[in-house]
Image (tube, grey):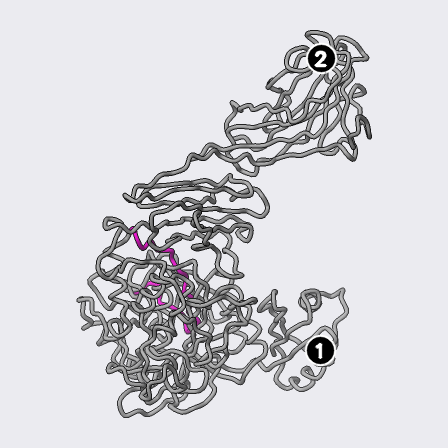
Amino acid sequence: LLVKYKNSVAQTRSLGNIDSNDSPLNTWQSHATSISTISEERHISAVEINATEIDLVWEELMADEDVELVEEDFPMYKTPYNSIQQDSSDSDQTSHLRHKDRHLKQQQNRTLMESQQYGIAQIQASAVWALTKKYPNKYPNTPVKVCIIDTGYDGSHEDLPTVGVTGTNTGYGDALQDGDGHGTHVAGVIGAVGNNGRGIVGVNPDPTKFSFHIAKALNDDGVGTASSVLKGIQGCISSGAKIISMSLGGGPKSAIFQELYKEAYDKDVLVFAAAGNVGVMQDDYPATYPLVVSVGAVDKNGNRADFSNWNDQLELMGPGVDIYSTFPGSGYGMLSGTSMATPYVAGVAALVWGYFPQCSNQQMRNVLAKTAKSLTTNGSDCNRKTGFGLVQAKEAFDLLDKYGCAAGGEDFSPPSAGGVGGCGQPLADTTKLTPTNTVSVSSGASSSNGCKRLFLKLLTDDYAYETSWELKRVDNGKLLNNGPPGNRKFADKTEYNGPASGCLDPGTYEFAIKDIYGDGITAPGFYSITLDGRTLARNSNFGTKEITSFTIDSSQNIIIEPRQPDWISLLYEGFSNGFGKFNDGGADAIHVDRKFGRNGMVMIKEGTTNYHQASVFSNNIPLNDRDFTKFKVVFSFYTNSMDTNDRFCLDYSANGASARSRAKCWRSGEGFENGEWNDNVEWVFQLTANNVNSIRIRFRGFSAENFNRVFIDEIRLFGQTELT
């Protein structure tokens, strides 16, 4: 059974009780043979029980006050499960049986000449390859992770990526093994390696521009369960996949599945699923969920395959008849079905999204729909038999290149609110958009003919949600672009690399990067911006905000406004509540609650007999792996009755060392007078030590008389890193 708990506490208690001899069991738990977690965030678990007790346990679960929902753990299958007779094509299962009969012969006689199947040209993938190869600097790529939920993956296949492939075991063994062949066939459609002189070419032929995560949710007969597929989906989400391809189906509509698809969508994941192969109008799941893109199949002539299911949620079409792709054992085979169309469409999403990583899943989904080749006969853009039409990679690429992510419409909050599905998907009206790229790339535009585009490279840290950026034109204040778009957040420890603008006209611009916590991006994270191959800024220690101003003059020259690195706040203490972040060295350092109209301060009163007692020193201040090269102390002070040569000094130590270095001494008669406040006094110093992880500062008095006093208030410490 599938169980959704009301909260994480209830789920944890349930998981703990089943293995504990000390905790009391709920009645239903005494009948459970195992309980396993599917999703901690959504509080979903799989409960295994004896079949004879299912009715009893179901009733007890529904009566459990900690349980919100109970569903059957129904079977699921590769698409389709039942063999279907077709005049013009074979079903997945029929072709699979034929493949088994001729598998050895295929291995012996397979061509070593690399071939490109009709589907590649049909979806315009090769046109995107050609364009991005011609202008590699203009179109940098951010690799996209694609997750396949299927029967596994032949990890030793000669024509499939072998590096960086990860997997989730849902209970059917090693994800990088495939005893059925269906999952390996799907993988070849998405990413069979190109330019290796053998086999076929996938939609994404360059394995450096994407990666696979494999969830083996179906066994070697192509059969699984709802719980195994749910575990596969969770594995995809946890792996950081942006795209999930599901050539499977089975079971009724499930509220628990909807919960997990909502989690995926709200985490910027785009899910594709096969519409089914019965050739009728019916609701097959998971394809019919609104947060899943339902994919139908066309033949080599671009006509809808007569086995392709249809309904109001059908959204896109892909090549799905007589698809030649990889099979286990470095073999190749031909299958037909919406199972094959789905990886074609998912592959296009990966191909295009890698060049526009700043766009959301909702925007990418809408652009694929907006640019699909309509297959309707009545002139409408979309219908329930073919959706928006045949996916077109180059059309989608060009629309994003022209209008940016705005071509995909606005993001919703939460993102899943925009996932309507089918012909109801809310597409953008591009007639109301202003092109961001005023030069046609198709005609051969590049930086050499005047197009200057700003490129951003960003490597996030463990707190990516703190980071954002924006690009503005100064003269009119217009916001040109920003990231992350909409209500999304950047992913932790992820590299983003792509254009931050279209072609920029002559004018003055400001690029601002922000961190809401105020500590920039923790190393090794960083950001850099380049314009026409010239690096304008690169930094990680930018504090709360860093602005880079630049001008493109009428002769297309780039002028960078001079900028000083920001000071990052490391410490503030106003002494309104005792010593705060400081410590007293002894009896000659005293906290003063209120004096001179101030809310608090410290007083150093004598230093001739025991200098350490006449001191205040900070706690160790961690630098959080930031390579500061300079430090600045800002403070206010007041003295009375200090004679000439009486002084107080600032010193510091690094990495908790007991030995300190002198930074500065202030002497009476040299820069200050007794009896008045000296506010916002600054001193800058540099450390000589390398690999500094922490710093500590100290103020110490060296006066000659016991009644000499130094009052210190409002101490601040800042760090600075040189711009690189």
Q: Which residue is nearer to you in this view: 694 or 126?
A: 126
Q: Is residue 268 magenta?
A: no
In the image, is 158 to the left or to the right of 647?
A: left
The label nearer to you, 1 versus 2, is 2
Front in this rendered view, residue 691 or 593: 593
The residue depicted at 43 percent of the width and 61 percent of the height is 359
Residue 304: x %, y % from top left: 31, 85
Q: Which one is in front, 355 or 610?
A: 355
Q: Would you name the residue on which mark 2 appears?
A: 702
Classify 10 Å Cα crowding around label 1: few (below 14), some (14-19), many (20 and above).
some
Residue kind at label 1, given as amino acid type: Trp
Answer with the quarter of the image where residue 373 lies: bottom left
Residue 321 position within the rendered picture, expressed as x and y whole percent measured from the top left: 29, 82
Q: Secondary structure at mark 1?
A: helix
Query: Where is mark 1, residue-wise?
Result: 28
User: Residue 568's image quarter?
Assistant: top right
At label 2, which amino acid type do we have?
Phe
Q: Which residues are magenta?
A: 137-157
In the image, residue 559 above or below residue 222: above
| Vertical order, 519 against 641 (above or below) | below
The residue located at (59%, 46%) in the rendering is 517
Q: Name the residue: 51% across, 44% down.
A: 521
